[in-house]
Amino acid sequence: MTESSHLRSKRHCSKIADAIDAMQKEALDEKIERMRWQILDFSNSVANGKKCHIEQYENVIKTYDKYEKILQDHDMTNGVVEQSMEFIREKYQEVLHGERRE
């Protein structure tokens, strides 16, 4: 292998690595966005009076925990769903204690 073909090969590998990095970032961004919308949509449904089961609340709370971990692992910040989660947790406590009247 000549030196110029070796350099071309390195550049080609570098382009492939860059493309993979870009695809991973895009997939991560999409995952975060899906989780965020799931949380916001659930909060909106509860706020609009939709009756939800305990399991649905627990699923959204687990999703939020995963969402926060992903953000932390990638040095990202939230800032979008905190108020929605506070509301969801309040309503979840009401459902757990039978205080919610539908």
Image: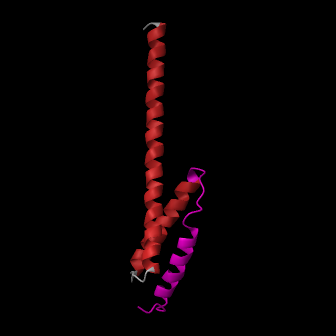
Q: Residue furthest top?
A: 2
Frontmost residue, 46 versus 94: 46
Residue in view at x 45 percent, y 16 percent: 8
Q: In the rendering, at what x and y percent does residue 6 appear?
A: 46, 13
Residue in view at x 48 percent, y 62 percent: 36
Residue in view at x 53 percent, y 72 percent: 84
Residue in view at x 48 percent, y 71 percent: 61
Q: In the rendering, at what x and y percent does residue 90 appear?
A: 54, 81
**Placement of 15 over or under 29, stated as above or below:** above
**Placement of 11 over or under 57, stated as above or below:** above
Is residue 42 located in the magenta-colored stretch of the structure?
no
Residues shaded magenta: 73-102
Q: Residue furthest front?
A: 48
Q: Is residue 95 left or right of residue 83?
A: left
Frontmost residue, 53 versus 38: 38
**Placement of 51 over or under 72, stated as above or below:** below
Is residue 82 located in the magenta-colored stretch of the structure?
yes
Query: Which quadrant of the figure contains the N terminus?
Result: top left
Frontmost residue, 75 versus 80: 80
**Placement of 48 over or under 25, stated as above or below:** below
Please tell me in which quadrant of the rendered image residue 35 appears. bottom left
Q: In the rendering, at what x and y percent does residue 37 appear?
A: 45, 63
Query: Which quadrant of the figure contains the C terminus?
Result: bottom left
Please tell me in which quadrant of the rendered image residue 42 appears. bottom left
Q: In the rendering, at what x and y percent does residue 19 appear?
A: 44, 34
